[in-house]
Image: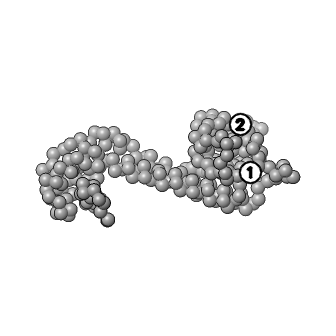
């Protein structure tokens, strides 16, 4: 590991490198880091105050709960970056105007990521903006899963909803042009999000549809995004970590 220009950070980094290997006692930290015992004792106490280290029931030192939170934050940041890159790659391959990823919140849908061909003052779309669920293609995908999750759906709509769930996508028009909406599936086949591609209508072909190549590319991207979302949600299963970090106070270092 290349040392930094800040000595105290180098010392803390050396201690963390020892804790990475598993539970360890103070003499072992001193031996492996080459630091003086008073220095190690002072830094370990400070690291306990910050939740970067703690002592187990045998009195050995282990990595602290705050490191878990930092690792989770780093994982989410990387996942968000990879998601934006996925949308950008899909837009570049398909040549569409925009690619969006939306999730449902109650009776609204919220855009959590978006890639546009170009930014303009005419576009007021905000990745965090909420929109009501209506009958455009994206909403039709949301509604296809809502009836199933609620255990009922109108008989006249049952066949259409079943077809959307089976196919995994639907295309049609909204006020902005032609839209392809693809289901992003979560655990056990539930709907995790909707991936949508949007392009303006061509003047001579207002009833145009997306090619099989574009639909296939969107379906493959949705499958990759599904894995990313599941991985991201898995990090949220670690609960109570922040409370433990707040409770982690100074402990005796012999």
Asked whether residue 151 appears in the rendered view, the answer is no
- Disc on the earlier residue, 2 or 1: 2
Task: Report the disc number at residue 134.
Answer: 2
Q: Do the residues under discs 2 and 1 have CB atoms within 8 angstroms?
A: no
Percent across and percent down for residue 206 are 84, 49
Query: Could you tell me how many numbered marks the image carries?
Result: 2
SS at mark 1? strand
Q: Which of 119 and 112 is in front in this view?
A: 119
Percent across and percent down for residue 216 are 69, 60
Q: How far apart are marks 2 and 1 (CA)?
A: 19 Å
Quadrant of residue 111 in the image? Answer: top right
Q: In which quarter of the image is the N terminus?
A: bottom left
The residue drawn where x is 39% and y is 43% is: 239
SS at mark 2? loop
Percent across and percent down for residue 233 are 49, 48
In this picture the colour scheme is one colour
Quickly name the residue at label 1. 199
The residue drawn where x is 76% and y is 46% is: 177
Q: Badge 1: how crowded within 10 Å, few (<14), some, or many (20+)? A: some
106 left or right of 138 in image? left
Task: Report the disc number at residue 33.
Answer: none
Q: Badge 2: how crowded within 10 Å, few (<14), some, or many (20+)? A: some
The residue drawn where x is 33% and y is 47% is: 66
Closest to the camera, between mark 2 and mark 1, is: 1
Percent across and percent down for residue 119 are 65, 48
Q: In this view, does 246 lie above or below 15?
A: above
26 left or right of 201 in image? left
The residue drawn where x is 21% and y is 51% is: 43
Q: Nearer the viewer, residue 158 or 77?
A: 77
Asked whether residue 3 appears in the rendered view, the answer is yes
């Amino acid at each position: 590991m290349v040392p930094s220009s800040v000595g105290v950070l180098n010392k803390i980094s050396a201690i963390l490198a020892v804790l990475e290997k598993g539970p360890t006692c103070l003499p072992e930290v001193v031996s492996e880091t080459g630091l003086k015992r008073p220095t190690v004792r002072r830094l370990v106490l400070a690291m306990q105050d910050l939740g970067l280290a703690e002592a187990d029931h045998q009195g050995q030192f282990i990595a602290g709960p705050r490191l878990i939170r930092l690792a989770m934050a780093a994982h989410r940041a990387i996942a968000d970056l990879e998601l934006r890159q996925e949308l950008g790659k899909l837009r570049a391959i398909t040549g569409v105007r925009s690619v969006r990823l939306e999730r449902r919140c109650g009776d609204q849908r919220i855009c959590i990521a978006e890639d546009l061909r170009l930014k303009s003052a005419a576009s007021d779309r905000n990745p965090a903006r909420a929109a009501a669920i209506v009958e455009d293609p994206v909403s039709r995908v949301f509604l296809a899963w809502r009836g199933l999750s609620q255990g009922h759906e109108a008989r006249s709509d049952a066949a259409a909803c079943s077809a959307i769930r089976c196919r995994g996508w639907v295309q049609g028009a909204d006020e902005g042009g032609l839209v392809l909406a693809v289901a992003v599936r979560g655990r056990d086949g539930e709907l995790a999000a909707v991936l949508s591609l949007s392009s303006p209508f061509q003047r001579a072909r207002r009833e145009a549809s997306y090619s099989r190549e574009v639909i296939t590319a969107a379906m493959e991207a949705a499958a990759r995004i599904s894995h990313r979302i599941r991985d991201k949600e898995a990090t949220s299963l670690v609960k109570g970590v922040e409370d433990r970090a707040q409770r982690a106070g100074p402990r005796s270092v012999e």
